[in-house]
Image: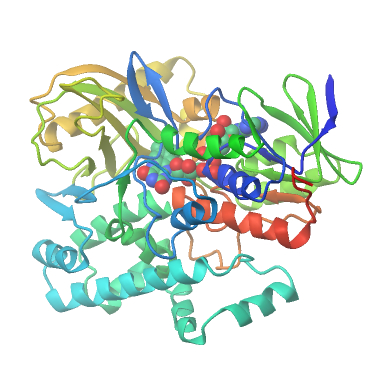
Amino acid sequence: MTDTSNTIYDAIVVGSGMGGMTTAAMLACDRHRVLVLEASHVPGGCSSSYKRKGYIFESGATTLIGFDQHQPLKFLEEATGIKIPRVELSPSMTVHINGHTITRYKDRGKWVDEAVRVFGNEPGQRRFWEKALGVSDTVWKVSGRNRHFPPKSVKDWLRLAFTNNPFDAPVLRYAFKSVADVMKECGVDTPLFRRFVDQQLLITAQSVAADTPFLFGAAGLTYTNYSNYYVPGGLLNMVNAIRSYIEDRGGQVQTRSRVVKVEESMGGYSVITDKGVVFRAPVVIGNIPVWNAAGIMNGRMQPWFNRMSARYDEAWGAFTMGVVTTDAYADDLPIHHQLHAGHGISLPVTGAGSVFVSMSMRGDHARAPEGHRVLNISCHTDADKWFNLGDSYDKIREEAENEILGLLKEKLPGFTASEVLMSFSGTPVTWQNWVYRHKGRVGGLPQSMDRSLLDWTPARTPFPGLYLCGDTVYPGQGIPGVTLGGINVYYMIKQNHELKTNQS
Ligand SMILES: Cc1cc2nc3c(=O)[nH]c(=O)nc-3n(C[C@H](O)[C@H](O)[C@H](O)COP(=O)(O)OP(=O)(O)OC[C@H]3O[C@@H](n4cnc5c(N)ncnc54)[C@H](O)[C@@H]3O)c2cc1C
């Protein structure tokens, strides 16, 4: 075992997902000595990229928002000066459902007109989307102001009372109403609109209209009405911009360093890697799912992590595909598409009601040469069913690939005219092996009407100096969600610890 106790870090981040990279960058901004330990050979976890046969594929996430007013990536850029390379998309997405192609325009007026065109009931649709956009704007504004949410102490509650505008309080009633309740109130709960909303919520809230509080669902449903971006060369370039910033300011990001044990020692923590190296710091941030954290925390921390892990024990798995085709797509074809399986139909093998397809941008030659396009495809699947399949695993995986390619042939404009040059897939088993997500669970905790607004895995644990961020911690999944969580953890650390700086 190599003991690096002579090298003093102020904070160690376990995992280099966007949540942990955000906290690390904010700490590096203040010149604290920060070390990020990442198990994989590249940083970024579910929002990263990888190369295969000369093409660049996204690891998971493909859509990117968060740079508008009150949103967390804007905050991160302004606080640190980091510039994330990006180009804005227009439109944000199209949805192919029951013979309709729905364009998700960013422009709010244009979007509501589009919703009316497809779903009818003009007054009802207008009311629904006005509410959703209004609630969403308030949620972004209020969530960026409340760094200690959910409150865990009297001080946190007092802070909530004093930092907030009482005029925003009425929005809280939507924590107790589901998206389906609001649809009914607006008279828009038709089978077609319900199906559209359910599948849009699955990709943003990991849940459906009946089980998603409108407070969170509104932000998920209007995702496309904020500025949506594409990162040329892949999302790894976003993560690398943050990595360079951390390293330029004296921090370190070490890949191929899997943490196998965290234990309390000398008023702080010892963090031990699979290579037997021991690092020490007074502050440790676990940017790994709570289920994974339970596997590495030792001593008196273990029972608490086991309890949290058992309490928040639900999440989806993903079946993903990487496909390369020749480029016979129309010039104006958007790059993000949600393809529905058909009314009331789920794909038989994956069980998905829809599939999400994101294409590399034409001309992004870092990802694919001229005349070729890379397609990243994902859908929800029950993670558990992919484990213990024994000898039938490969066959079932192939069947899943075929059902997805069949749907693309049927629904993705230009796909049949393009030749498939390469295709492969990843199941929840793959997800467990390459980004270590416990049981292949991705996307964070699904929203639920049974869980209160205050009921989340806490970012601040009962153990002084030990924090959590990432998509199993408030406010949950998605790049903007985990970035916000990472910023919140930074503020909690600043509030509770007197950290040294590498200039002191
Ligand atoms: C298929 C798919 C599509 C998605 N699409 C979108 C989208 O379009 N837009 C969007 O905003 N979000 C999307 N998401 C969600 C988003 O990608 C995630 O919620 C977010 O990236 C998770 O970030 P995180 O901070 O929780 O860390 P993670 O991304 O989970 O990263 C954790 C990191 O920790 C590392 N690690 C694990 N264990 C250890 C250990 N013991 N020691 C050291 N390192 C360890 C892992 O290798 C990983 O790099 C998608 C997710 C998936 C799976």
Residue drawn at 47 percent across, 31 percent down = 428
| Relative depth, front residue between 494 and 44 | 494
Residue drawn at 36 percent across, 31 percent down = 320
Residue drawn at 44 percent across, 78 percent down = 171
Residue 235 in sight here = yes
Q: Where in the figure is residue 364, as x and y percent of width and height?
A: 25, 29
Q: Where in the figure is residue 481, as x and y percent of width and height?
A: 48, 54
Disc tally is: 0
Residue 436 in sight here = no
Residue 84's place in the image compared with 186, above or below, is above
Residue 283's place in the image compared with 411, above or below, is below
Q: Where in the figure is residue 163, as x and y percent of width and height?
A: 59, 78
- Judge from the rendering whether residue 499 lies leftward or rightward of residue 285; answer left or right: right
| Relative depth, front residue between 486 and 150 | 486
| Relative depth, front residue between 280 and 76 | 76
Q: Quadrant of residue 367?
A: top left
Q: How is the image coloured?
A: rainbow
Q: Quadrant of residue 273?
A: top right
| Relative depth, front residue between 383 and 249 | 249
